[in-house]
Amino acid sequence: MDSAPPAVSLSSDVSIESDTSAAISAAQKQKELEQFPRTKLAHLPTPLEYCPRLSKALNGVNIYIKRDDCTGLATGGNKARKLEWLMAEAIEQGAEYVMTQGATQSNHCRQTAAAAAKLGLKCHILLEERVKGDADYNENGNVMLDDLFGASREKRGPNLDMAAELEAVAEEYRKKGHKVYVIPGGGSNPTGALGYVNCAYELVQQIEELGISVDHICHATGSTGTQAGLVTGLKACGSTIPLLGYGVRFAKDIQESKVFTLAKATAEKIGMPDCVDASDVVVDSEYVGPGYGTPAEGTIEAIRIFAELEGLLLDPVYSAKGAAGLIDYCRKGNFKPGENVVFLHTGGAVALHGYLQYFQK
């Protein structure tokens, strides 16, 4: 982990005690997760990195990046954490195939295909045409890697019930005698969300090791598993750090409802059914732009700012829309100078190769 910025002080003795208590609890609760099957796929813990040039450019808000773009599996990204638990469950159930679905440039499908290759399972994916794209969008980036990892794939048009489409295909394979394990889009169910319960425990301990008091944690939120796991983990270990998800697809009320539903199920799974309240789930969907998978002006600006100031690559579908929210919050004063803000980088830079038209000079 990079060192903290100069003259960072904790806000009070109360916050010191609270942070320390949460960190101790997080370490204990990490051990409790060992009751669930898990296969190691990710390089953990990922770094918590202070970004001095970005902090200076964003009005003196101290920006830390939780580097989940460095999870290792197939160029990294947040899905590696979820897949550790999902693939273990697939193996435990004797699966021959894993099947999942996502948009054409799905980071989740790419990492699922890689995990299957690593573990000797077959992978079949359904790619939804949520965005009308050019040749780069349809064949480059994540799609090319899906093929390299040996996954078979089918295309689907927009606005279908992709969960139903996936289950129908899985049932066809089962009728042929194949054992199929279905992974929902984004790996977002209570099993997958365990990856981000674990991430919350990991992050709380890293914050304690740095000796800082964090005022906000924020990230991009899409299929809900990352935010649901994080909020469950934070609340389960007693952390009081506010969590904010920047929506990349759905309106605020819809996304908050989806996240809370999964968070409740995840909390039930870890044996703490009452630890998350609806008020703990906060989403801002003002940075979606024209729609899912279509970059806004702020999306492209965020990609360039992170690249030019910190050498960090964002993706145009998820992390850059979250970063656009972070940047705007710093500029508007929602995040104040001197505050410590953690931005969870969910990875996905491979998708940049599907969006070349947005970066031509």
Image: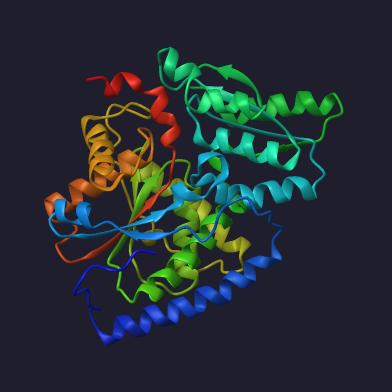
Closer to the camera in the image, 278 or 5:
5
Figure check: 295 above or below 235: above
> Residue 349 is drawn in which quadrant?
top left
Q: On the rendered image, what quadrant is the C terminus found in?
A: top left
Q: Using the rendered image of the protein, determine whether residue 350 is visible from the camera's viewpoint.
A: yes
Question: Residue 15's x, y, as percent?
Answer: 30, 80
Question: Is 248 situated left or right of 128 in this image?
Answer: left
Q: Residue at x 44, y 66 (%)?
A: 234
Question: Residue 217's x, y, as percent?
Answer: 34, 59
Question: Residue 306's x, y, as percent?
Answer: 27, 43
Figure check: 338 above or below 155: below
Q: Using the rendered image of the protein, determine whether residue 161 is visible from the camera's viewpoint.
A: no
Q: Residue at x 84, y 25 (%)?
A: 175
Question: Is 319 situated left or right of 58 in this image?
Answer: right
Figure check: 311 above or below 117: below
> Residue 66 is drawn in which quadrant?
bottom left
Q: How is the image coloured?
A: rainbow
Q: Residue at x 33, y 64 (%)?
A: 242
Q: On the rendered image, what quadrant is the N terminus found in?
A: bottom left
How many labels, in total? 0
Residue at the top extreme?
135
Question: Is 2 situated left or right of 300 in this image?
Answer: right
Question: Residue 165's x, y, as percent?
Answer: 63, 25
Closer to the camera in the image, 237 or 134:
134
Residue at the right extreme?
177
